[in-house]
Image (cartoon, helix red, strand yellow):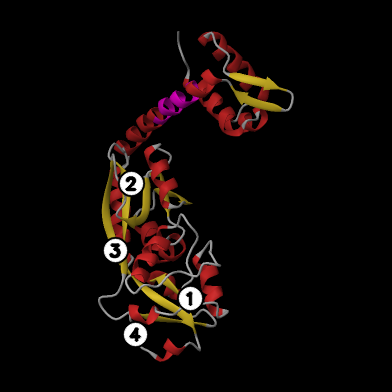
Amino acid sequence: MELKLRDLRYLVAVADLRHFGRAAARCFVSQPTLSAQLKKLEQTLGVQLIERAPNAVALTAVGEEVVARARRMLEASDEVVELARSHQDPLAGRLRVALLPTIGPYLLPQVAPAIRRALPRLQLHLYEYQTAAMIEKLHAGELDLGILALPVELDGLESRELYREEFLLAIPERHRLASHERVRIADLRDEPVLLLEEGHCLRDQALEVCSRVGVRDSQDFRATSLETLRQMVAAGAGVTLLPELAGRGAYRSGRGVALRPFVRPAPARQVGAVWRKTTPRLAAIEAVAELIAKHAP
């Protein structure tokens, strides 16, 4: 019995999209070709993998199990190709990089020009994910490199620290603390603190800072982004903690918002890089990480 990786790619595409036409488009073949190859795959295996209905596509129970194994086989195949390419030119080709939503928009303007200059043959494919999804996709081989807040549970992954980023206090520009050059964590007492919604590690880090003086977050508001938090502060709804890079460049002069550093030692987060131990793209990952460490602070 001989299995073809091409047919497994067709099967995974159908599993992902639950639609033969869209799966065929993803695989750059016609729908009749894809359908015929999947029929042949079922005949070769001697089991039905896909339930076909006029307006629905579903996998059978054995189909779900086959797809799970097919993903691992395709991942291994892709790693073989990437390994060969990396030996030909380790600093060329595609590198899939994910960043936290609280890091990407603020870090990339600082480091992207330097990466383009130093690694012109490297093609960065950039994504945004929260920590849990990023770690899952790293393990699954869907990402090569993650930029996130450390520490995280590694379990088969490697990491390195890139830079330390202090937090700033964002307050309405007419707030009582706006006249202070630096603020203290104790100044947060009796202030309504606005935070991100559940799932953002920055929320947990900010809560840890607030817990030092018994402050709790505002219970009637959860933001989906730092920029939403910034706008709510400008509207006078409360105060919030922002990472230092979110107070630089174009983000420094947000209308209606004053940013104040904390008295040293200031609360901070450690930003780092995470990748699979078995990655064939280690040279490219190390080069990108070194450039971020150099240009981010």
Pointer 2 residue? 91
Q: For mark 2, does the 10 Å Cα neighbourhood hold few (<14), some (14 to 19), or many (20 or more) residues?
A: many
**What kind of residue is marked 2?**
Leu
| Disc ID at residue 163 | 3
CA gap, disc 4 to disc 1? 19 Å
| Disc 4 residue type (three-letter) | Arg
Which residue in the rendered view is the most extreme toward the bottom? 179
Give the residue pinned by disc 4. 182
Q: Is residue 148 visible?
A: yes
Few, some or many residues within 10 Å of mark 3 (<14, 14–19, 20+) = some
Specify the segment rendered in magenta.
Answer: 66-75
Q: Give above or below for 23 relative to 234.
A: above
| Label 1 to label 2: alpha-carbon separation | 48 Å
Are dots 2 and 3 in contact, CB under 8 Å?
no
The quarter holding residue 88 reads: top left
The label nearer to you, 1 versus 2, is 1
The quadrant where residue 40 appears: top right
